């Protein structure tokens, strides 16, 4: 009988999440290049926003705080709103608040921003939803495990 071997040391939700992020990035990059004539962009485009998020995710906490402080100085506009919302969902700085990040991303999408900004906002919003669902599942499993441990303790006491 053959034994299945994983192709990577990453598995489960981590691998799925990385694959989804890479796939979304590829789709966004392809969508920007497909058949459209070359045009001058107002901002960095979807790839630039994804690069911004990637740098924030890879940064050390002190660097994330600097990125957060810089984002606070960006002012208004859809790009600045997107950057702040993206950063709010990344732990390691004073503005971290995933619930507010979701709210800000939803508000940004309600304003019908440029396609690139909307695509990145939708991708990050889905990523935050998946992460929050995972956290809820973990908390539920912890509660259930605690109940099982309590039952086992009670049964041990009854046996004595």
Image: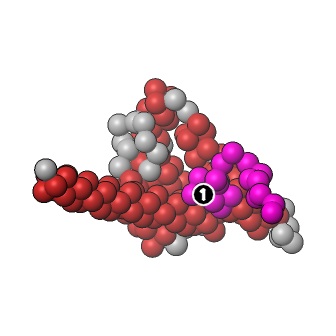
Residue 136 spot, x, y in % from top left: 36, 61
- Judge left or right: residue 91 versus residue 17: left
Residue 6 colored magenta?
Answer: yes
In the displayed structure, does residue 123 sit left or right of residue 65? right
Query: Can the viewer see residue 96?
Result: yes
Q: Position of residue 69 (x, y in %)?
A: 42, 35
Position in image of residue 88 (x %, y %): 42, 48
Q: What colour scheme does the image use?
A: secondary structure
Task: Name the residue located 84 percent from the left edge and 69 percent from the top edge.
Answer: 34
Q: Residue furthest front?
A: 160
The quadrant in which residue 18 appears is bottom right
Task: Indicate whether residue 17 is drawn in magenta.
Answer: yes
**How many numbered markers are drawn?**
1
Q: Residues within 10 Å of mark 1 (few under 14, many from 20)?
A: few
Residue identified by numbered label 1 = 12
Residue drawn at (74%, 53%), measured in percent from left and top?
6
Image: magenta residue range:
1-20
């Amino acid at each position: 009988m053959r034994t299945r071997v994983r192709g990577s040391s990453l598995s489960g939700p981590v691998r799925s999440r990385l694959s989804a992020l890479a796939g979304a990035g590829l789709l966004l990059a392809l969508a920007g290049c497909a058949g459209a004539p070359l045009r001058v962009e107002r901002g960095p485009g979807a790839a630039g926003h994804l690069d911004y998020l990637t740098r924030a995710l890879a940064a050390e906490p002190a660097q994330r705080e600097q990125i957060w402080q810089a984002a606070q100085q960006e002012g208004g506009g859809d790009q600045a709103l997107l950057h702040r919302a993206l950063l709010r969902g990344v732990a390691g700085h004073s503005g971290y608040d995933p619930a507010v990040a979701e709210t800000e991303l939803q508000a940004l999408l309600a304003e019908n921003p440029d396609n690139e900004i909307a695509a990145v906002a939708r991708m990050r919003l889905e990523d935050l939803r998946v992460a929050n669902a995972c956290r809820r599942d973990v908390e539920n499993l912890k509660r259930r495990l605690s109940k099982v441990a309590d039952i086992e303790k009670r049964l041990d006491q009854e046996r004595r």
